[in-house]
Image: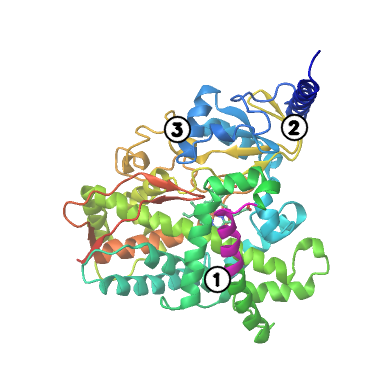
Amino acid sequence: MVPLALLESFDLKSLLLFLLAFLLVLDYLKNKPPLNFPPGPIAIPFLGSIFNVNFKEPHINLTKLGKTYNNIFSMQMGRQKSVFLTGYKMVKEALVNQAENFADRPYSPLAVRLYASNGGLFSSNGEMWKKQRRFALSTLRNFGLGKKTMELAICEESRFLQDEMDRQKGEAFDPTTLFNNAVSNIICQLVFGQRFDYNDHDFQMMLKYISEALQLEGSMWGWLYESYPAIMKYLPGRHNVLFRNYEFVSKFIRKNLDKHKADLDPSNPRCYMDSFLIEKENSHDPAEGFTEENLVWCTLDLFIAGTETTSTTLRWALLFLNKHPEIQDKVQEEIDRVIGQTRQPCMADRPNLPYTEAVLHEILRRGDIVPLNGARMAVKDTTLGGYFIPKGTTLMPILHSVLFDENEWETPNSFNPEHFLDKDGKFVRRDAFLPFSAGKRVCLGEQLARMELFLFFISLFQKFHFSTVEGTQLSTEGIVGITLTPQPFKICAKAR
Ligand code: HEM
């Protein structure tokens, strides 16, 4: 006779086994890829492929996977299958040749929690995104891009930056905060019509919180939240810091919005915020997104997208020109010859500074500022690289794989301004130079970022010689978040 306890345990075991088999079949059926979907690494049942990502250097890890799968592969990330694209040709095929098909952003649990629904400039889709992108671009143009106003504002900010560097008296200092202050003040001029003092407490906190949030968003915490939001929502962890930080920045923006509402003069808009409030009165269709809530989100996006990126590029500039003193010397020789040491640089100097222009391009390429790019979504069923991509599929066109593509760049891993110079020393454009991405969602602030980088960079190297404390070696290994930032470092700025 079989003892009752044994029978009961056998039954329980069978039940559990049956349940497990049932869930495995369910998981398989739910995640079964459609016919001719891009292949990819094997996924673990219930957990997907997230363990195939090396969170210390996902951009390098995903680029390597791309080589195994002929530049297009898929991975199960939580509840959704994502397709990863690598190499200039494949990324261009999706973003440029099929621009309309991949113009949308995918569903993002992070964005939904931040923006409540369709909102902001980065994550919105459809009519709202089109309307808001067009409005932001035209307002940026009205407030100085392409006119002298913006150029003058950047030159004025350069002087504040130079004064702060002068105050260091040639001693080693970390340039991160100073660059964040200067660059963010340009966004402040655009959206609020004013700059903030470098000692303003709320301004400083906002910058600190944005940097930290961007780091977390691109870290394992961001990926875990995007992949398993239903669980992560209730778990402790660094992802909670991310939401707290953005809440603080939103409050800072709301405080400024209240001031603008109080002294708005509809006949004399001073900035993006004023123009938005005026447009809000004229727009009667909520789908266009001219609401106060959406104004806060769009402003938040301009700060998030426009501060850390540009400021990080300037830090890479100091780092690379320190590692290559001969390049710093050549840049300064060209600046001295074309502009001299006293006149402030202006945008009209650009065509006369081919070597400096090549160095700036190489900083953006080798600095690899947004290594993974923004995610896209297929707007309709389409074919890419011979594979079927159903409507709604998430796409990750990896920018690192383009900026370091061995088929496009002679020495992809070196810092080499010659990539952008011909044999006569003239500046040459390169097709695979896509640090701002491409297509319908190409960086909205590209023109502004290029103007800032040019004017800040030249005014710094015109005035100072940068070096490290003797015996210090700077690392060119970056820290990955949404942006790729250099390891913290200290630099000495000696007046020339
Ligand atoms: C060196 C500086 C910068 C770099 C490398 C950079 C790079 C990028 C990249 C790679 C994207 C994603 C594009 C895509 O999904 O295909 C993007 C989007 C965006 N950037 Fe920038 N960016 C920079 C500066 C700025 C500045 C200064 C602003 C603000 C004026 C800005 C505003 C935006 C916005 C609003 C988007 C979202 C566009 C959309 O979805 O329609 N960026 N940027």
The x and y percentages for residue 357 are 36, 51
Q: Residue under circle 2?
A: 390
Disc 3 marks a residue whose amino acid type is Asp
Q: Identify the residue at the far bottom of this view.
A: 263
Part of the protein shown in magenta: 235-248
The prevailing secondary structure element of the residues shown in magenta is helix
* Disc 1 element: helix
User: Which residue lies at the image location 55% right of the left edge and 27% below the top edge?
Assistant: 71
**In the shown orientation, is residue 454 left or right of residue 26?**
left
Identify the mark nearer the N-term, 3 or 2: 2
Q: Which of pointers 2 and 1 indicates the residue nearer the eye?
A: 2
User: Which residue lies at the image location 35% right of the left edge and 60% below the top edge?
Assistant: 457
Q: Residue under circle 3?
A: 405
Residue 57 falls within the magenta-colored stretch: no
Q: Residue under circle 1?
A: 190
* Disc 2 element: loop
Quarter location, residue 476: top left
